[in-house]
Amino acid sequence: MRILIGMAAVGLVLSAGAANTWWVDDDNYGLSGLDGKSEQTAYGTIQDALNDADFAAGDTVKVLPGVYDRDGTVRSGVTNRVVITNKCTIVSTGGKEVTHIVGKHDATANGTGPAAVRCIVCTVSEARIEGFTIRDGAAAGGTADVSDNHGGAFLGYGRKNLIVDCVISNCVSGRAAGQNGGTSIRCEFSRNRGITSGSHLQDGVSYNSYFHDALSPSDYIYHVYNSTVYNCRVDCQANNCTAYNSFIRTDRANSKLYYSIVATKAGNTVLGTGSYNISADNAKVDEN
């Protein structure tokens, strides 16, 4: 299926002209005398930049290529690799292929538990995270609908937090293993595992993204749940979603589709304007 690349304006833009630019380079981890104000004196972790006494709302953090998998801060009952408490932009200089934010699975059977490390938690609105592979994160565990159990990769508050041009993979949590909250743009989600719901996306929005290869303990787990998607390909199960100009492999229940295609649908799936069921219409999907 061919998905249109164009995206309508979403009105989620951070203020131009950040007050300060901070630098991060994992090669500098453990070194002393760093101030984060240049590539040469870059901090060794993203959190070190965010914790600088002079860091202010509107600042930008530029992250050099590397694997950011050290240190952690406890917030929302879970250790987190990155805790964002100010409106800011965190952007890689080399792109998602070479810049990774890496959490940690617990040694338990499903990967959640007290030793788990979530990748990112954001406690404010209007932060922007751009150009990373965000992987191997996990939440505390359990299936109760509480924040400790949400967002192995990203836990955010409000849909004005942006995740742009990222890969989110191999994360696990009780609910919303990949993205919980926020808005993703041009992202790829793969091999995330929600124990009860939301393997890839829950309570959020996504534009021009690709969701595939979700991992689930049963066929009844919803991989994209209670969310809105635009111009997306969802090669897995959706539930209680609103989709525009998208492809949904399977809708379990309650979704509303507009100018979209669904391969397998539930009896209460709403096929709105311009939508159809390819199984019923015996249509073919162009997979390119």
Image (cartoon, rainbow, N blue to C red):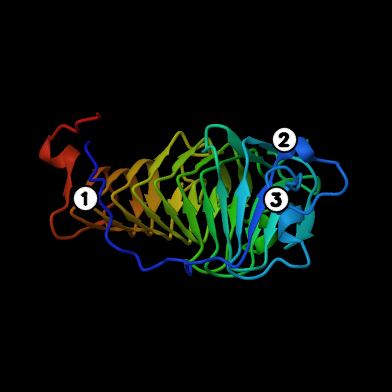
Quarter of the figure with residue 269: bottom left
Q: Is residue 129 above or below residue 131?
A: below
Residue under pointer 1? 260
Q: Residue furthest right?
A: 32
- Give residue 152's position: percent from left, percent from top: 63, 48
Q: Which residue is mark 2?
A: 109
Residue 136 vs residue 26: left or right?
A: left
Query: Is the C-beta separation of discs 1 and 3 under 8 Å?
Result: no
Q: Which residue is mark 3?
A: 46
Q: CA distance from mark 1 to mark 3?
A: 39 Å
Query: Tag 1: Cα neighbours inside 10 Å, few (<14), some, or many (≥20)?
Result: many
| Type of amino acid at the residue the image marks with label 3 | Ile
| Mark 2 touches mark 1? (CB < 8 Å) | no
x 68%, y 44%: residue: 39
Q: Nearer the viewer, mark 2 or mark 1?
A: 1
Tell which tag, 1 or 3, sits nearer the viewer. 3
> Residue at the location (55% across, 42% down)?
93
Q: Amino acid at mark 1?
A: Ser
Horizontal side of residue 61 vs 53, given as left or right: left
In this rendering, does residue 68 appear at all? yes
- Where residue 193 appears, as percent x and y from the top left, is 56, 41
Element under disc 1? loop
